[in-house]
Amino acid sequence: MWILRFKPVDCKNCYKCVRNCPVKAIRVKNHQAQIMQDACILCEKCTIVCPQHAKAEKNDVPSLKRMIAEGRELVASINSAYIAKYGAGSFPSLRKALLELGFSDVREGAEGAYLVKREYERLLEEGEKDVMISSICPSVVRLVKIHYPELMDSLLSVLSPMQAHGKYLKEQNRECTLVYISPCISPIAELNEQINDVSYVISFDELDDWFAENQMCIEDEKENVEPRLSRMRALGGGMSRIMKKNPKYSYMNIEGIDNCIRVLNELKEGNIHHCFLELNACDGGCIGGPSFQTSKVCRLQSQLELEKASISDASNIENGKDFDISEKINMSRGIIGRVVEESYPTEEELHEILVKMGKTSPLKELNCGACGYNTCREKAIAIFQNKAEVSMCMPYMREREASYANKIINAMPGMLVTVNTELNVIQLNKAAMDLFDIRRKKSIIGQPVSELMDDYAFVNMLSYGKTFSQDQIFVEEFKVYLDRVLTYDKSNGLIICIMKNVTKEIAQQQEIQRTRIVAARMADKLADEQLRIVHKIAELLGETAADTKVAVENLKETILAEKKEEKREKPEVWL
């Protein structure tokens, strides 16, 4: 059964969850982080720091609503961290609100803490164990039994406060269904244990959402608070403070999962004796749990509120009031340690993986921790165990991408010059270096771009804030014409200039222009010659036409004269 996992998101180049997981119980596959349920201790540090808010946890509220609708009898047990959440005098209001939601009864989970405290005092009085590790924090219990099974003998086999309260309430009413309300989800892991009477666990955040759906507000009646010592259980070191002490033992409080891991590593060395260790995974205890880490609750104010609700006289804790539970309850708990079996690479296999990561020598092993692992060798082992990917190494990927980018840039047929806002050259590709003959000169990097070419377009872009410019220039020193495209990247303060040598094209265009001019002149000459010939022909045709017209006129007159003569002769003939 999964308890905590990530929703599908793109985890590429982040790995914040891996960096913050104290036991490295996260596998990254295909740029997706996955929580390894068998190794997870449910501290929730990974989901708290996730920038994409990819947390997906088991939510039992819908099941509770359904059970209420069916008329089932639900009894709520509330972790005493409610004081930090809602106020020292908020329990009456909480009880009223939960009853309105459909619960049949609401009890303070501190009653279970009282039973645990009583059992701890008995075990310490007997003094059968050299070192005793508290079992009140489910995340610490999982940490020991999964990752430090060799210390299981020191872990007290005592019911957790949730389990103890559940057992106590169940003996009072066998028909009820118990619901534990917690500042974190780690108690869900205890639901599968053999000795457990609680059926459901919901967080304060889920309870808040439920209240919001029903438009409920929780009021704080501080004046009606009656202190009870066992409420201190929600505070880091609270259990140790309220317990009756056995002078043969030292009582120590450790808060924060990283500090707990350090102490457990020290315990493995076997140099610590006669100690009772109260370990809490969260800094501050339950009032520093996940429900509080993501809210604006003031830690100092919360601690003061909790102490006032627990202790009436700090100088006389032994005579302080507590819950009055006389029933004798079997508090034993079977906690079975288990080892997460993992394979490890040989030195040769490790070396091969390091080479794939670009770590070809110890000097390349930067151990920067960007991937989430403390050293490059730890990361290589994680790759062997199929927990990590080679691409999670940021320096290697950046170096490889830079190498690819340089290869692509140098393979460009066009010339590339990059300058900063001070108009100093910061990058040239091979084509530009060949054109400007950089190798035969002193290095141009860091020098003004005006040493290479006209910088007017660069100055104009910066002066007027232009992001794009295009022009053509002639470089006198090299007798070349260049087409330029300039792009101004304001965010990075760079002007990228991409150029193309168009000298041949310009020469061809000039040759074509000269050919056109010659052809035009020849055409003009030919046209003049043709016009002269036309004029000569026209002149000759004009003279010929005049002579022809005279001849035709003479012929016409002759014909007409002959016809008149014939007309005069005919009448005489008729007579």
Image (cartoon, rainbow, N blue to C red):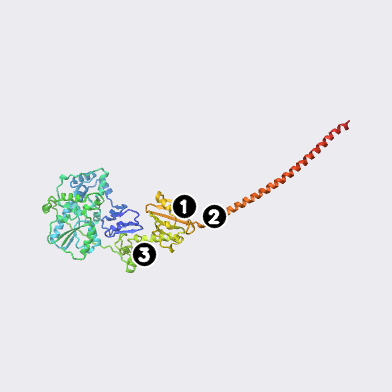
Whether label 1 touches label 2, CB < 8 Å = no
Whether label 3 touches label 2, CB < 8 Å = no
Disc nearest the viewer among 3 and 2: 2
At label 2, the amino acid type is Gln
Disc nearest the viewer among 3 and 1: 1
Using residue 244 as the reference point, say whether residue 457 is left or right of it.
right
- Crowdedness of circle 1 by 10 Å Cα count: few (<14), some, many (20+)? few
- Determine which residue is flagged by label 3: 356
- Crowdedness of circle 2 by 10 Å Cα count: few (<14), some, many (20+)? few
Q: Identify the residue at the far top of this view.
A: 575
- Using the image, determine if residue 341 lies above or below residue 208: below
- Where's residue 107, x and y in %? 19, 49
Quarter of the image where one finds residue 329: bottom left
- Where's residue 196, x and y in %? 22, 55
- Crowdedness of circle 3 by 10 Å Cα count: few (<14), some, many (20+)? some
Using residue 345 as the reference point, say whether residue 545 is left or right of it.
right
Quarter of the image where one finds residue 514: bottom right
Q: Which mark is residue 471?
A: 1
Screen quadrant of the N terminus: bottom left
Tell which of 171 and 572 is nearer to you: 572
Secondary structure at badge 2 equals helix
Task: Find the distance from the CA under tag 1 to the CA under tag 2.
Answer: 19 Å
- Determine which residue is flagged by label 2: 510
